[in-house]
């Protein structure tokens, strides 16, 4: 009993620094931001309490809802793009040959690059006159498909979803490879001896045993998508005509461009609330599917 208590105290003291740092730099700012969401404050001077006015204004603003709709596109692209592609690649690359290790490193490389660098790269790819994409279309004789990819409000958000998916496949690939490596090979061997096909083994053994990892990946996708900012800001700054505006860029513009710190704090609090709702809903649906 004493050994168990000592071990718990040792673990607690080991976790204490990280918990304190997380509380100071994450938990406290969230509540501090929620507090300023009730204020009319320009960043300097005295903050004036105005109750729920900032939240009511945000929820009645068309650009806020347009930004939320764009964010949901990013969430959908991340959850149904990054996670399935990373899982498929992990299943294909789980053997560990030299070629598979090379592909694994290549897929992970975008995560090493800064989002600003990735935004610049893809801005040149989409560039109407000298961009790689329009150049390829001209080369294969599809010039009628050429367009200003980031200047067309009807497709700009969908085109930005592509580099977002490409940017973050790597971390989920590593997560799934680690989860797959923890599955005992004896289970697959026994199932193969019993006549189970690869598809049957995938759905009866592999996916159930890494289901918790998939749920974690979905949580990270949703939370990361709702705070996406840098790549969007570098490529379009939310334009054209707010067609690619996200909640984070909407909050940034209102906070630092027009100096409405109270309103920006209210929007950031709404982002946290929406993130929690989406995460809770996804985990509920995945729990029921798992059962």
Image (cartoon, grey):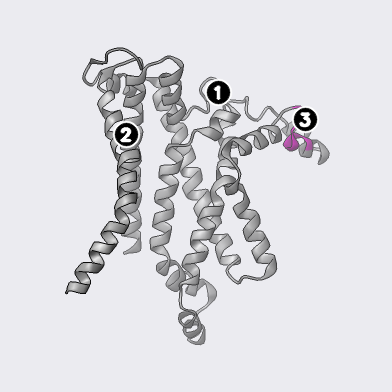
Residue tagged 1: 239
Separation of residues labelled 1 and 3 (CA atoms): 21 Å
Q: Which residue occupies the extreme top position in the image?
A: 45
Residue indicated by mark 3? 130
Task: Please give the name of the residue rendered at 27% of the width and 15% of the height, measured from the top-left corner.
Answer: 47
Does the magenta run of residues contain 69?
Answer: no
Helix, strand or loop status at disc 3: loop
Q: Name the residue under label 2.
A: 29
Q: What stretch is highlighted in magenta?
A: 129-135
Question: Is there CB contact under 8 Å for labels 2 and 1?
Answer: no
Q: Relative to residue 195, is residue 260 depicted above or below?
A: above
| Discs 3/2, front | 2
Horizontal and vertical percent position of residue 165: 56, 45
Answer few, some or many: residues within 10 Å of disc 1's Cα (few below 14, many 20 plus, some between 14 and 19): some
Secondary structure category for the residue under label 2: helix
From mark 2 to mark 1, how far is it between C-alphas?
Answer: 29 Å
Q: Residue at x 62, y 39 (%)?
A: 118
Residue 160 left/right relative to 5 = right
């Amino acid at each position: 009993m004493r050994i168990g208590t000592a071990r718990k105290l040792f673990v607690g003291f080991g976790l204490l620094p990280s918990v304190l740092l997380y509380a100071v730099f994450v938990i406290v700012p969230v509540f501090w931001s929620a507090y300023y969401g009730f204020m009319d404050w320009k960043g300097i001077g005295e903050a004036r309490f105005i109750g729920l006015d900032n939240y009511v204004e945000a929820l009645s603003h068309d650009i806020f809802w347009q930004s939320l709709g764009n964010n949901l596109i990013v969430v959908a692209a991340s959850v149904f793009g990054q996670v399935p592609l990373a899982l498929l690649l992990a299943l294909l690359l789980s053997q560990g040959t030299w070629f598979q290790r090379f592909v694994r490193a290549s897929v992970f490389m975008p995560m090493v690059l800064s989002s600003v660098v990735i935004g610049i790269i893809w801005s040149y790819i989409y560039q109407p006159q000298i961009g790689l994409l329009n150049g390829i279309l001209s080369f294969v004789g599809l010039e009628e498909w050429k367009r200003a990819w980031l200047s067309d409000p009807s497709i700009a958000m969908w085109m930005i979803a592509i580099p977002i998916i490409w940017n973050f496949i790597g971390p989920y690939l590593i997560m799934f490879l680690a989860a797959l490596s923890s599955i005992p090979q004896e289970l697959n061997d026994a199932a193969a001896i019993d006549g189970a096909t690869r598809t049957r083994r995938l759905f009866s053994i592999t996916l159930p045993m890494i289901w918790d990892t998939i749920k974690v990946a979905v949580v990270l996708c949703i939370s990361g998508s709702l705070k996406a900012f840098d790549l969007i800001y570098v490529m379009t700054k939310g334009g054209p005509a707010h067609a690619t505006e996200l909640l984070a860029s909407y909050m940034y513009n209102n906070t630092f461009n027009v100096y409405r710190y109270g309103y920006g704090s209210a929007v950031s609090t709404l982002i946290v609330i929406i993130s929690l709702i989406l995460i809770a809903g996804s985990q509920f649906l995945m729990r029921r599917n798992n059962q």
